Amino acid sequence: MIFLMLHHIASSQGNFRIEDDKSKFELPFQLVSDLVIIPLELNGVKLSFLLDTGVDSTILFSLDKEDSIDVKDASIIYLRGIGEEEPIRALKSTGNSIKIGNSFSNDLSIYISFDNSMNLSSRLGIPVNGIIGNDFFKDFVLDFNYLKKKLIVYNKDRYSSKKCNRCEVLPLTFSNNKPYIEAISKINGKELKLNFLIDSGSGDAIWVFEEKSAGVSLPEVHFDDFLGYGMSGSVYGARSRVESIKLGKFVLNDVTASFPDKTYIDGLKTYDTKNGSIGAKILRRSQVIFDYSRKSVSLRPNRLYLEPFEYDMSGIVIAHDGQMIVKELDHSSTNGINNLNTTEGAGSVIYESTTSVKFKLQPLYKIVEVRPESPAEKVGLQKGDILLEINNKPAYRFSLSGLQRILSSKDGKRIKLKIERGLDKITIDFRLKKIL
C-alpha cells in the first residue's frame, strides 16, 4: 500500500490539452493491486506512472537501467510524506514535455527523486516510474472503468454529463489541490460525518485518523500490522473494521479500515482538519467520474460493489526483488524425417526428438514483512525469505497480484510454500486464517 502526502510544493504551471481539439479519447490502463498504472511519454521517453488523486504534483522516481532522460532547469528541494524517515532530497525541474494518450503538456514541472523508499516497482511487481496526480486531473473530466481497465479522458469545457439513475454525484472540496469528500462512517456504534481524502493511490479501503475530539477512536477488535509505505518510510498501525461507510445513497458494510499510529502523521499539516482517506478498494467497486472543474465525483456501482472486504489471511507481505536465472528444458524440437531408402522400409518416417536447455530471467519474490501471531509467523516464515514455489508451482509463474490473491483467497485454505533461506531450501505448510 502506498500513501503519499506532499507539502510545500507549488502547483505546476503547464496545462494539458487534447490533440486536434478533440472532445475525448480513451486510454487503456493496467490495474495492479487495484491501482491504476498508465503509459505516458516524458521528454520523449516511454514510462509507466501511477495515476493518483492523493498527490498534487508529478514525481519521477525510477528509470530502467537502459533509459536516460533529459530534464531542464533543475533545483534542489525536499519532499516529505508519511513515515518516520527524514525528508527526501529531490530535484524540481520545469519546462518538461509530457504526452498521455492523445493529450499533452509542454511546460510541466516535475519532481525527481531516486530514493529507494519510493520504488513502487518492487511492491507492485511491474515497472512503475513515477506518479502523476492533480497536474492531469485538473485539466480534464476523467471516467474510470475499473472492470474494462479503460479511462475516458474528456475535454472539460465540452463535457456534458449523461442522465444516470444508478449514479450518485457527490460534491468535492479541495485542500492543497487534493479532493476531499464527506462520508457517514459508523465506528464503534456511532455514526460520524467525516471528511476523507479520495486517494486512488492507496491500495486499502479506508484509512482513519484517530481523533477523540471528533469521536474517532480505534475499535476494540483490531490487530497491529504493517500498513504500507509512505514517502518517508514504512508505516505501522492497527487494522480493524468499521460497521459501514455511506457515500450519498450508497452504503458499504463491514469495511476494512487501517488506523495509522499517530507517530507517523502528527507532522502533517492536513491532519488536524481531515479524518483519513478513501482508497482503491472502495473506488474499484464503481465506475468513477472525477470532474475537478465542477468540484464533483460520480459513482456508479459495478458488479464488484457487494464483494466482501477481506484482509490478507497469511500474514506475509511479498515484494518483487529483482530477477533470477531459471533453467528450463525445451522439448519442442521434435523433427519428422522422411526415410525412403533404409531398412525401416520405403516411405517410413523416423522421428528424432531433441531437447534444448534455455535460461530465462524470471521475477524473484521476497518476504518483506511478517505479521506477529499470523499463520505465517507461527510456522516460522521470516523477513528476507525467498519464495520459490507456492502450492507446488514455481512462484515466478505468478504475478505479484496473483500471489496476493492466493494468500487472501479462502479461510482455511492449505498453502504450501518452498522458500530459500541462506543456503537452505525449506518447505512450509500452513492454512489461511481470516483474522477479522
Image: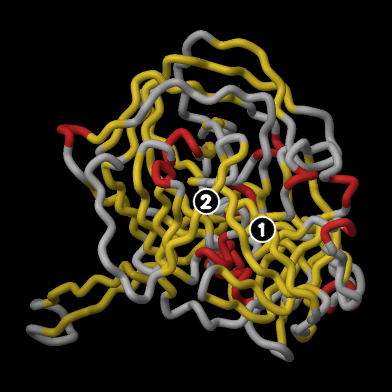
Question: Which mark, residue 284?
Answer: none
- The alpha-carbon separation of the residues under discs 1 and 2 comes to 40 Å
Give the image location of residue 129, x and y in percent.
52, 37
Q: Is residue 69 above or below residue 136?
A: above
Q: Amino acid at mark 2?
A: Leu
Q: Which residue is mark 2?
A: 172
Apparent side of residue 213 relative to residue 23 in the rendered image (left or right) = right
Q: Residue at x 72, y 59 (%)?
A: 207
**Labels in figure, total:** 2
Q: Nearer the viewer, residue 193 or 285?
A: 193
Q: Amino acid at mark 1?
A: Tyr
Give the image location of residue 354, x and y in percent.
36, 68
Q: Which residue is mark 1?
A: 365
Inspect this view and state whether residue 325 appears. Answer: no
Dividing the picture into quadrants, the one containing residue 351 is: bottom left
For the C terminus, the quadrant is bottom right
Q: Residue at x 48, y 60 (%)?
A: 170
- Describe the colour scheme in one phrase: secondary structure
Q: Is disc 2 surrounded by few (<14), some (14 to 19) or many (20+) residues within 10 Å?
A: some
Q: Nearer the viewer, residue 403 or 344?
A: 403
Q: Nearer the viewer, residue 276 or 436?
A: 276
Dividing the picture into quadrants, the one containing residue 105 is: top left
Give the image location of residue 139, x and y in percent.
37, 36
The mark that comes first in sequence, 1 or 2, is 2
Apparent side of residue 113 relative to residue 57 in the rendered image (left or right) = right
Q: Nearer the viewer, residue 386 or 154?
A: 154
For the N terminus, the quadrant is bottom right
Nearest-to-viewer mark from 1 and 2: 2
Q: Is disc 1 surrounded by few (<14), some (14 to 19) or many (20+) residues within 10 Å?
A: many
Q: Residue at x 64, y 72 (%)?
A: 245
Direction bottom: furthest residue = 412
